[in-house]
Amino acid sequence: MNYTMKKIFKNLTLALLVGGFVTSCETIDLDQRVSPNDLSTDQADPNLLLTSIQLAYATNQQTFSNTAAQLTRIDYFTGRIYFNALPGTELNGVWGRTYSSNSNGVGDPVSVGILTNLQALEGIDATTDVDYSFHVGVAKTLYAHSLFQLVDFIGAAAFSEAGQPTEFPSPNLDSGEAVYAAAFQLLDEADALLSAAPESQGAVDIFYNEDTTKWVKLVNTIRLRSYKNTGNVSAFNTVIAADNFISETEDDFQLQYGTSELQPDSRHPDYAGNYTPSGANAGYRSNWLMETMLENNDPRIRYYFYRQSNGTPGALDVNGVLVPVSEEDLACSLVVPPQHYLDGNYTFCSVNNGYWGRSHGNDEGGPPDSFKKTAVGVYPAAGLFDSSAFDADSGLTTGVGLGLGGAGAGIEPIFLASYVDFWRGEMGSDADKATFLRAGLEKSIAKVQSFGALDGSADLSVAPTATEVTAYIDDTVIAFNAATGDDKQNIFAEQYFTSLYGGGTESYNYYRKTGYPTTVLPNWEPNPGPFPRTLLLPQNEVITNPNLSQRTDLNTQVFWDTNPASPAFPPAN
């Protein structure tokens, strides 16, 4: 575990306890003295409050990314009926961590929410002689991004009545437009604080190591993604012209994981679920993404996915030999695909070359395949690089296990420079798309390939060469320029989604705004219900807040989603 992560987790429990004291309203009426469990804000440690904010935010990013990636086929989605697979509990944790309290996701029972701790930091900053502008600026940045995301996922959020439990014990939700405007204002306030390069006052910054110049770039990058969502080309271009956003890989905004297995487990969550003594137990890889990358001969595929078997039942193995179907290992390999899969010539069950995953909506139970199915690779989870190390007799590798590969010291990508290149293409002409398609691929592939060094056992002689990478990028851009209509848009969207692997939050926004790529696999279920334009309101808030009523469908559209209503849009659904 690196030094920063050690500092974080050493102080985590204390941070959460302090945060809990700050928000407690219990007092003991003994000689009118204040209970030690009711510390005032000026007695809290601002550094620990900021640590709690960062951890709550980081865990929220995992949830947003996982949900978005599953819906857009970057990751595997398990539900045949969208409404049933996305209950009101989906964003309970996100809501609690944003506003009040919930599990922080790293093994501790309680953390105080981002807003509560931001308010405490503002109170401390206003009543002490120490300048805590850094703390407040960082907290406002993360809170603003959280508000944007809540709107993007549920269409509304609490703001004007949030964080005022005495006056508004049951806060109403503000409209998406109003929350977006408020979040932009928060970014302005954060920008003003951070641009003055305030001292960090001993804070632990798990993202940028107390570098305020990078935080200002992040503020502008969040502005870019939000102007992109609303289609505000003028404002988007104004930020671009100022040239102070995440444009180089060295400025990437990401969470760095560690290698500790216990107390706490600091490894990448996907690594922790895939590299166990009993095999890859946590989920499946997306058939759509693996097949798309395989057909494109994408140079990132060996880094994204680690094959444990050289062939999948019902598909061709690495030698071009058909693997027998197997009811025990892959029940769907014996099933005749439904008509909508046959009509579209979609891969219903099995991908060639040992890429053993599942297709969108497959809700079958889990067979004994934990040492056969494809696991997460060395990017971004710091697993194993796929060296095609298959046993000649069994067709299997030695399999996944504790500590293998990079031991889990991967990253949670949030905003990468390659993502911003794709945004610039999205907001421009076809010529712009070609330019930034190239730039995005160059950055994405270079970053992904750098992760190969994390796996000391990797045989990188099978990795794509620089010449092969250049040819891949050239061929992709040539194909984009030569294509027309949906084919052109699909090439751009497929490459964007592939580059978002591991940090797929923005794919959900892109898919609802453009409807591309139209090449994604349909749900297994012929009638899965309309594609979710937003999710249900967080059920915990609905239960405790009499001003809210739960929705009865997933059809509510975000204010910037002006496309036709589902099920007509997106067209692939």
Image: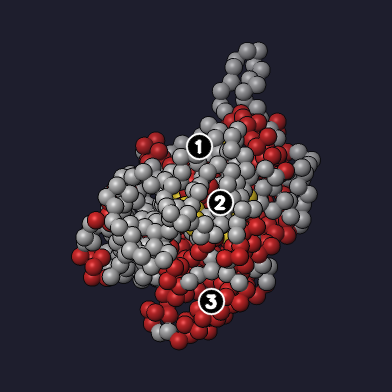
Which quadrant of the rendered structure holds the N terminus? Answer: top right
Give the mark nearest the N terminus, 3 or 1.
Answer: 1
Q: Residue furthest bottom?
A: 482
Q: Is the residue 361 above or below the residue 546 in the image?
A: below
State the residue in front, 394 or 128: 394
State the residue in front, 417 or 32: 417
> Distance from label 3 to label 1 (Cα)?
45 Å
Secondary structure beneath disc 3? helix
Residue found 44% across the figure and 76% down from its top:
491
**Residue type at mark 2?**
Gly
The residue where tag 3 is placed is 472
Q: Residues within 10 Å of mark 2 (few under 14, many from 20)?
A: many
Residue found 54% across the figure and 69% down from its top:
299
Q: Residues within 10 Å of mark 3 (few under 14, many from 20)?
A: some
Q: Residues within 10 Å of mark 1 (few under 14, many from 20)?
A: many
Residue found 53% across the figure and 51% down from its top:
61
Discs 3, 2 touching: Cβ within 8 Å: no
Using residue 52 as the reference point, say whether residue 546 is left or right of it: left
Secondary structure beneath disc 1? strand
Residue 284: give x, y in percent of width and height.
41, 52
The residue where tag 1 is placed is 102
